[in-house]
Image: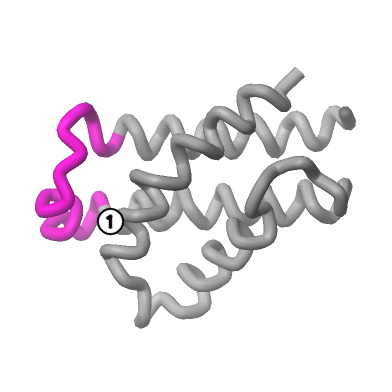
Amino acid sequence: MKLEINKYLFDIRTSIESIEDYLGEKRDFSEYQNNKLLRRGIEREIEIIGEAMNNILKLDPDCQIRNARKIVDARNWVIHGYDKVDDIVIWGIVINHLPKLKIEIAELIT
């Protein structure tokens, strides 16, 4: 695997770990929803994840990460549809999809 792809994989892993740190063990949706700083921080990390994935796809269009295109689409939605970002959708990404992505990334980092 190209060194550059590894760098982007590392960036994705770092952003996922940052989100985990922001939320702590509690993982409370009400706290997330009522804390603008927390919401914005998580949205920013999702943007970074999507941008890194976009760069990976440019280098390797046949990338073996499931839902790679959807990850980029989520980034675009957060950035360009900022006025339509839905807390429930973001929470679903964080709780349901990022743990799976973290495992995939760990398997790919060399």
Identify the residue under disc 1.
39
Answer above or below: position of 8 versus 107: below
Q: Is residue 37 rendered to the left or right of residue 34?
A: right
Answer above or below: position of 19 versus 58: above
Q: Position of residue 12 (x, y in %)?
A: 58, 38
- Residue 63 magenta-highlighted: no
Answer above or below: position of 81 versus 57: below
**What residue is at 25 percent from the left and 50 percent from the top?**
38
Answer above or below: position of 75 versus 9: below
Q: Quadrant of residue 110?
A: top right
Q: Position of residue 93 (x, y in %)?
A: 41, 53
Q: Position of residue 104 (x, y in %)?
A: 62, 32
At label 1, the amino acid type is Arg
**What residue is at 86 percent from the left and 49 percent from the top?**
62
Q: Residues within 10 Å of mark 1 (few under 14, many from 20)?
A: some
Q: Quadrant of residue 8?
A: top right
Range shown magenta: 22-38
Q: Characterize the magenta stretch by its predominant secondary structure.
A: helix
Q: Secondary structure at mark 1?
A: helix
**What residue is at 53 percent from the left and 64 percent from the top?**
74
- Residue 26 magenta-highlighted: yes
Task: Give the tally of numbered discs.
Answer: 1
**What residue is at 86 percent from the left and 53 percent from the top?**
61
Q: Position of residue 57 (x, y in %)?
A: 80, 53
Q: Quadrant of the N terminus?
A: top right
Q: Is residue 26 rendered to the left or right of residue 21?
A: left
